[in-house]
């Protein structure tokens, strides 16, 4: 047998042996990945798959597997939050409906005994009954508006909107209420006109919700303010007050569905927890952003930021 043939055989044996060892190592590593994944799935842990390997394909596989695990953990966390939010929403909705409905039932029972009531008493009860019924209808309308927004089942035509004019109009609509509360009104709307792309009905509702929210919860500060300002390439609308504000622990949650501060369930405030949720979703639908900062009795500011257009 020639030396060349022997060399070829030796090379083939070496390559075959190397491939055999590589395949064995690959099987072991894939088996280890399988075992780690099985443990993570069965134990529902937040672990990742870790392994020392110098094989590039295995390294790439591990990167993608761990990305998938991270994504799955986010989905699970979001699902837990969504279920908790739904549970709280149903609990709060039940509370917000049960109380006025119980009052309405009491008024109805009273009216059934109308022969024992004077006309003046009867008219007073009818007036309170109408007020409570309207309150329930308003709450249900807000709830279904929020459901429609979250499902995307809303007609949302976009047009060029004059921010200055719309803000002035909304403040004027609340001017008598602001005066009746004895609030000092500080408006800073520049002479230069600013424009955004958005939906006018949605913007009116955003401003209405934020202005009424400032009056409801911030009137004890004695001041209501609205400012329009440039923020880089954007336009920012600040609606602020100097009331008791919102504690830091609540700042990240005020836009959740039916999330209310403890005192928002005080009959004096009549907060449903839906207004700010609707405001945020309308702002998101207009490709904007809403921010909140609060220093109790110094300044509480809701800021809506929209992309400015120059045409």
Image: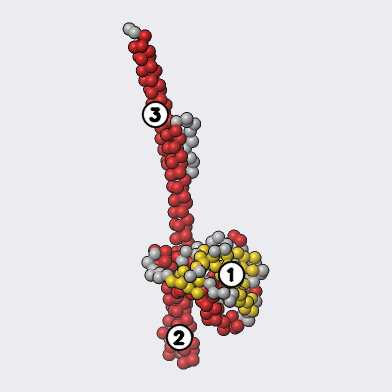
Residue 126: numbered disc: 2
- Residue at left offset 45%, top offset 85%: 126
Q: For marks 3 and 2, give the CA distance.
A: 81 Å
Q: Quadrant of residue 7?
A: top left
Residue 256 x/y as whole percent: 50, 63
10 Å crowding of disc 1: few (<14), some (14-19), many (20+): some
Task: Establish if 33 lies above or below 179.
Answer: above
Q: Quadrant of residue 44?
A: top left
**What residue does disc 1 label?**
229
10 Å crowding of disc 2: few (<14), some (14-19), many (20+): some
Residue nearest the viewer, comparing 100 with 307 = 307
10 Å crowding of disc 3: few (<14), some (14-19), many (20+): few
Q: Quadrant of residue 62?
A: top left
Q: Answer left or right for 302 relative to 286.
A: right
- Residue at left offset 52%, top offset 73%: 163
For the residues bearing labels 3 and 1, Cβ distance under 8 angstroms: no
Residue nearest the viewer, comparing 217 with 299 = 299
**What residue does disc 3 label?**
27
């Amino acid at each position: 047998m020639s030396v060349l043939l022997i060399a070829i055989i030796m090379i083939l044996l070496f390559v075959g042996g190397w491939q055999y060892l590589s395949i064995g190592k690959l099987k072991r590593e894939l088996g280890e990945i399988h075992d780690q994944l099985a443990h993570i799935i069965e134990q529902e842990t937040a672990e990742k798959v870790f392994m020392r390997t110098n094989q590039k394909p295995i390294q790439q596989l591990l990167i993608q597997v761990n990305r998938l695990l991270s994504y799955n953990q986010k989905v699970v966390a979001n699902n837990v939050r969504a279920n908790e939010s739904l549970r709280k929403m149903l609990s709060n909705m039940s509370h917000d409906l049960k109380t006025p409905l119980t009052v309405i039932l009491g008024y109805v029972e009273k009216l059934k005994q109308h022969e024992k009531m004077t006309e003046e008493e009867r008219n007073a009860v009818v007036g309170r009954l109408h007020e409570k019924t309207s309150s329930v209808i308003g709450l249900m309308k807000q709830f279904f508006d929020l459901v429609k927004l979250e499902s995307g089942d809303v007609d949302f035509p976009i047009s060029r909107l004059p921010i200055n004019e719309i803000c002035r109009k909304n403040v004027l609509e609340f001017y008598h209420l602001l005066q009746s509360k004895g609030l000092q009104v500080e408006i800073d709307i520049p002479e230069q006109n600013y424009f955004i792309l958005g939906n006018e009905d949605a913007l009116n509702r955003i401003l209405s919700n934020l202005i009424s929210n400032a009056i409801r919860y911030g009137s004890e500060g004695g001041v209501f303010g609205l400012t329009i300002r440039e923020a880089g390439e954007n336009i920012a609308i600040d609606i602020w007050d100097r009331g008791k504000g919102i504690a830091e622990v609540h700042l990240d949650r005020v836009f959740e569905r039916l999330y209310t501060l403890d005192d928002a369930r005080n009959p004096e405030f009549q907060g449903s927890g839906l207004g700010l949720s609707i405001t945020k979703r309308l702002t998101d639908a207009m490709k904007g952003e809403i921010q909140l900062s609060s220093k109790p009795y110094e300044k509480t500011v809701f800021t809506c930021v929209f992309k400015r257009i120059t045409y």
